[in-house]
Every structure is written in C-alpha cells, then in structure tokens.
Amino acid sequence: MDGKFNRHAQKDESEIIRLEGAVPQIIDKNTFRCVQDIFHTRKHKGAQYKAKEPYLLTGKIVCGKCGSAYVGNRRKAYAGHIGYISYRCGRKNNAIHCDSKEIRKEDIERAVLRVLSEQLFDDKLLPRLEKEYAAFLCKQSSADAEEYEQLQNRHKEINRQIGNIVGVIAQTGSAALTGKLHELEQQCAQIEHTLSEIESHRREQALEGQRLADAFHRAKAMLEQGTLESCRAVVNTYVDRVAVYDDHIAVRLRLSAGFQMEETLARGE
C-alpha cells in the first residue's frame, strides 16, 4: 500500500494469531530483565566518551517537564568569569522548545552522590533495605508458588492416569494406549523439570539477602574511594534515573531488577 512489502503492518489485530510461548525461551525471565536494565543504562552513554568534561550522570538524567535527556553544556570562560558547566534539557534550543531550567553540574552530581551515600549506603539503613527486599522477593515468589501448586496437582493427575493406563495395557496390550502412555510420560517429565526450576529459583532467593548486604558494602567502599571511575561504576549500577524539575529533583535508585526506591530533593539541596 505504501510501497513496502510488509503486509503484517496493515493487518487488523483480530486477524493476527499470537502463540504465547511458541518459541522456547533460552534464558530465564530474571536474566532477561537484568540484561534489559543494562541495555537501558547504556542507551545514552555514547556522549560521555566524547565530552570534554566527565559528566557523571550521562544517560541517567532527564527533564522532568518533557522527558527529554539532559545533556552536558559548557559556557566558555571570559574576563571575570570562570565559566559554567551544567546539564540542561536537550530541547532547550531546539525547534520544539523546552523552558526547563539548567542545573549546575557539580550541584546535581554532588546531590546524587549524597543520596547514594546517606539514603542508600548508610549502615543504619541496611536492616530496612533487607526487610523491604525480602518483602519484594516474597511478592515475586507468590506467582511461583501458585504455579508450583498447579503443576504439583497436574503432576499427581497425570501419574494417576499413567497408573490406570498401565493396568489396562497389562490386560489388553493395546497399542493405542501405549502411545497415550508415552505422551503422558513426556508431559510428566516436562512438569518435573519445571518444578525443579522453581525449586532452584527458591534456593537462589534464599541467598539474595546476603548478596544484597555484600553488594551494599562493596558499593559503599567504592563511593568512599571518591575516584571518578569508582563513583561512575556505582552510579551506573544503582541509579536508574534522575529527573530534574524546576523546584525539585527525583532520584530513582535500582537495587536489582524490579526493586527500586525513589528519593526527592528540593533544588539547591
């Protein structure tokens, strides 16, 4: 219709047949989410290697008004002025104009590092974080628990059917029932494999609390080093987004896939 060959683009939703799970997944959902998080954090990082200034929040900081990425900006120094290095909305001077206020680079970076140091990696907060993380894992596992129970019931039912069929085959030698028996045995093996995966996931979750504590202390040590690379590594790992508004800054922290918390700061703090 528009000179392109893709006919699917013109199909109505009612004409499309979708088969959920038709292609077997090769990685588990948690690993997939973690990889997507890494892709997200790297999405806008190309500029940080070209910039003359080391912008710590490149790819993390966005405009609270229009949602565009904030970009680094440097005003040249002149007599009596040392220059001004800032982050500002990428649409500030574009055709689609945004009047969001720029923010001094050192102010916003210092504020984010302080949030990490005082609001996240404070030893007094670790018990609360562990408690909240345990609640998060419990909520995550509730879906697994429901699936586990359903699979167990299905497994019992299939074993009952297998027992009945084996009895009939012993008496009649039916070839048709032999084929049905083989099909049920395959279903049973698949269910046992899925149950094993869920049990393995539960054991992994039991270790998550200790892993959180270990990661917490490693990140805190890196922040205390105070080097650009160590701070950048912590920011890339734990800062999901920094949204700048005219009167406040919202810092969203990510402790793991799906587990986030947000801190709000007034502009100028």
Image: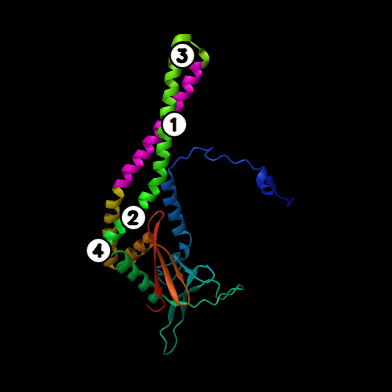
State yes or no: residue 180 in magenta. Answer: yes
Point out the tag, 1 or 3, that comes first from the N-terminus. 1
Say which amino acid is labelled 2. Answer: Tyr
Label 2 or label 4, whichever lies nearer to me, is: 2
Circle 1/circle 2 CB separation < 8 Å: no
Circle 1/circle 4 CB separation < 8 Å: no
What range is drawn magenta here? Answer: 177-206
Say which amino acid is labelled 1. Answer: Arg
State how many labels appear.
4
Q: Which mark is residue 168?
A: 3
Q: Residue at x 65, y 47 (%)?
A: 13
Q: Label 4 crowding class (10 Å Cα cut-off): few <14, some 14-19, many 20+?
A: some
Q: Is residue 77 left or right of residue 207?
A: right
Point out the tag, 2 or 3, that comes first from the N-terminus. 2
The residue furthest bottom is 80
Label 2 or label 3, whichever lies nearer to me, is: 3
Label 3 or label 4, whichever lies nearer to me, is: 3
Q: Which mark is residue 154?
A: 1
Q: Which residue is mark 2?
A: 133
Residue nearest the viewer, comparing 196 with 173: 173
Q: CA distance from mark 1 to mark 4?
A: 47 Å
Relative to 92, say whether 196 is above or below: above
Q: CA distance from mark 2 to mark 3?
A: 52 Å
Point out the tag, 2 or 4, that comes first from the N-terminus. 4
Q: Residue at x 35, y 39 (%)?
A: 199
Label 2 secondary element: helix
Q: Which residue is mark 4?
A: 123
Q: CA distance from mark 1 to mark 3?
A: 21 Å
Label 1 or label 2, whichever lies nearer to me, is: 1
